[in-house]
Amino acid sequence: MHRCLELARLGAGHVAPNPMVGAVLVFEDRIIGEGYHRQYGKAHAEVNCIDSVSEADRDLISRSTIYVSLEPCAHHGKTPPCADLLIAKNIPRVVVGCRDPFPKVDGKGIEKLKAAGIEVTLGVLEKECIDLNRRFFTFHTRHRPYIVLKWAQSANGYIARPGERTPISNEYTNRLVHKWRSEEASILVGPRTALIDNPALTARGWTGPDPIRLVIDKDLQLPAGLQLFDRKVKTIVFNTLKHEEENNLLYYQVAEDSSLVNQLITALHRLKIDSVLVEGGARLLQSFIDEGVWDEARVITNNDLVIPAGLPAPRLQNANPISHESLLSDTIRYYHHD
Ligand code: AOF
Ligand code: ZN
């Protein structure tokens, strides 16, 4: 199963919003086949694993055990069901890392295998298998995107001087932030950040896709000249006035009252956006923290920068970092919620 996880990770950046999945076929302690889900919409791990078996080993398949990091699928999607394939190949034993929460599968793959008389073992390295696909799992079990909060603060805890764009992190950390952007499906900012910083919110400093840009602009007051509105990347404007789409710019209408955070995550679930990097400002970040709706926080502190007065950084109540690293003047602390 460790090998399945290694294989699965090779699909990183190519399979979202599908999960990363790896599979290994073992005959008497010898690996005779390996595969992983390589590309969104293309063959699943089990198919690639079975296809990789050499001609000489083909007749061993029906006496082997297949290990898969995620429950084999039971549905006809872009490819036929993997459970049917394993049954057709007469594989006698299947070891599964974790159950697939996707509604069209969700236990049905395991049921199919068992009904065909296959011995199924579930839950090997389960925690690791779920963690690998935490965006996919959060999306399907909590019906909301996986939420990563990010901000940069001065040594004395401010995120900006009042009312002006304030560079805080250094050029190396800025690159890292572009990597983070390319790893999430979307990136969100509040209206003041959009106006004061005029950010492009792209991953131009890294190789990888740009996230969908999300901005809150209740009364549609942000100037049309902002970089966010350049239509070079798909952008969604959450507002209370109109619902319409025009090339690469979607105006998504939300209700005036009730919790903004809840409305946002419900909208993102509806739009099938499975993860979001929240980049500020302080007020928006604090609403996610106060409502307890976040999964990770990454806090960059520039140890050499002291701002006399300004906008205080968000507060993560009682959270302790699970790890940290430093890039010259900057220290990055990583937090996990729960
Ligand atoms: C597997 N093995 O390697 C993967 C699975 O759109 P489709 O047809 O590719 O189906 C996507 C769904 O299939 C996805 O949401 C997840 O439930 C499952 N992914 N299943 O048996 C794999 N990648
Ligand atoms: Zn499948």
Image (cartoon, rainbow, N blue to C red):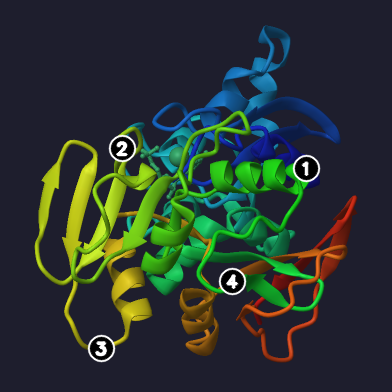
Q: For the point 41% across and 64% down, which residue is it?
A: 140
Q: Depth check: give the residue in front, 83 or 102.
A: 102
Q: Amino acid at mark 3?
A: Ser
Answer few, some or many: residues within 10 Å of disc 1's Cα (few below 14, many 20 plus, some between 14 and 19). Answer: few
Residue ID for mark 1 = 172
Q: List x then y, in percent, for residue 114.
A: 49, 56
Q: Which mark is residue 230?
A: 2
Residue ID for mark 4 = 295
Q: Is residue 6 left or right of residue 68?
A: right
Q: List x then y, in percent, for residue 171.
A: 74, 42
Q: Is residue 266 visible?
A: yes
Quarter of image, ligand 1: top left
Picture quadrant where residue 260 is located? bottom left
Give the spatial CA distance, label 3 vs label 2. 30 Å
Q: Which label's residue is closer to the chain start, 3 or 4?
A: 3
Disc 4 vs disc 2: which is toward the camera? 2
- Position of 208 relative to 336 (above/below): above
Q: Which label's residue is closer to the chain start, 1 or 3?
A: 1
